[in-house]
Amino acid sequence: MADPCKRYMSMYLIFLVIFGIGGMFASSELQKFNQPTKDDGSMSFLVIGDWGRRGDYNQSQVAFQMGKMGEKLDIDFVVSTGDNFYDNGLTSEHDPAFEESFTKIYTQNSLQKQWYSVLGNHDYRGDAEAQLSPLLRKIDTRWLCLRSFVVNAELAEIFFVDTTPFVDMYFSDPEDHTYDWRGIGSRKAYISSLLEDAESALRESSATWKIVVGHHAIRSVGHHGDTEELIEQLLPILNENKVDFYMNGHDHCLEHISDTTSPIQFLTSGAGSKAWRGDIKGLNKEGVSFFYDGQGFMSVQLTPTEAEIAFYDVLGRVLHRLNKSKLLHSSI
């Protein structure tokens, strides 16, 4: 006769596999965070990418201008498009670079808001898990970095997508770099699951504005150019679900490119510190409205009917504006 204890343990293990521990793995849906809007239903935020250099390469100057603009716009939060810590991410949860490149740099009152961040390829070259650790949130409560997740602000939903595992080169030709692929497991299964989750979340969204954030550009005329893997695998999902804006970093510049086959706008904000690369891809310039090779950042202001996006340089000067309108649909 079978041991009742062993039988119970076997059934319990099967239950955990099917339903997940405490329900944690019962669903593969992207984790969602609620972000309040202003009393009038509007919202505003800043977007910065490719920044963490302990204040060097004009990082501190960009941060200062972000603080001034953040106060002027009364921002609700900040979005980071990745490559948060150079050159090779963080070494651990206790790496002093976290405070030296983040906490001690973005000190203005207006920037003491929630920061929503994704990982970039340089972050994967260090201890990628460290940036995801709740311990960093105890060191600085503003910090929130996950691989992929959703910020729900009712007026807008922002879908953060982990784009680094999509890029073939990091696996086939990593050069002298070592990438921390813990948490990825099977790359094929990871990407497939992520695309499925992103498509489901976008399809179910009823937000007026749909925004997707990733580190790598879909379209860019900067140093790295277009990311073919995202054009092939992610872009069709964005177009099908009527995404308004795709925001990224990776190229150390500021860009605005319009899609030629859909209303989506491609916006690069990867100029948080080291920039002035000096090279522009001559291919596929169609749809390019704006390109700036220097340091800077981006602001986003949203209402139920209007979106205004502005790009700023290291002196806080407005370089380019984008306005997009939507009609209010009556429920009567």
Image (tube, helix red, strand yellow):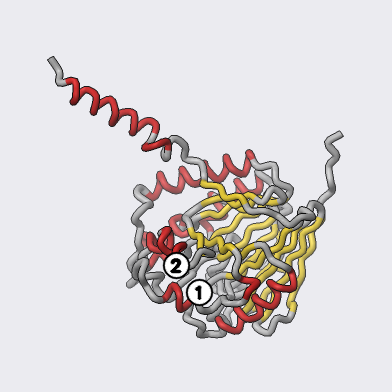
Q: Amino acid at mark 2?
A: Ile
> Can residue 170 be seen here?
no
> As displayed, is residue 20 above or below residue 35?
above
Residue, x 46% and y 43% (percent of image)? Answer: 193
- Image location (x, y in percent) of residue 64: 63, 81
Disc 1 crowd, CA 10 A, few/some/many (<14, 14-19, 20+): some
Q: Residue at x 80, y 57 (%)?
A: 306
Camera-side residue: 153 or 48? Answer: 153
Q: Nearer the viewer, residue 326 or 38?
A: 38
Indicate the quadrant containing the C terminus: top left, top right, bottom left or bottom right.
top right
- As helix, strand or loop, the secondary structure at mark 2 comes to helix
Residue 280 shown left or right of residue 28 in the figure: right
Q: Secondary structure at mark 1?
A: helix
Return the x and y of residue 52 as percentages of the image width and height.
49, 75
User: Which comes before the other along the chain, label 1 or label 2?
Assistant: 1
Q: Which residue is at the front of the view, 16 or 135? A: 135
Report x, y in % for residue 149.
53, 51
Marks 1 and 2 close (CB-CB < 8 Å): yes
Is the residue 162 above or below the residue 121 in the image? Answer: above
Residue at coordinates 47% horizontally, 55% vertically from top-left? 147
Amino acid on which the number 1 mark rests in the picture: Thr
User: In what quadrant of the picture does the N terminus appear?
Assistant: top left
Q: Which residue is mark 2?
A: 139
Q: Which residue is mark 1?
A: 103
Query: Most extreme residue toward the top, as rendered?
Result: 1
- How far apart are the alpha carbons under marks 1 and 2? 9 Å
Most distant residue in the left direction:
1
For residue 2, side relative to residue 292 (left or right): left
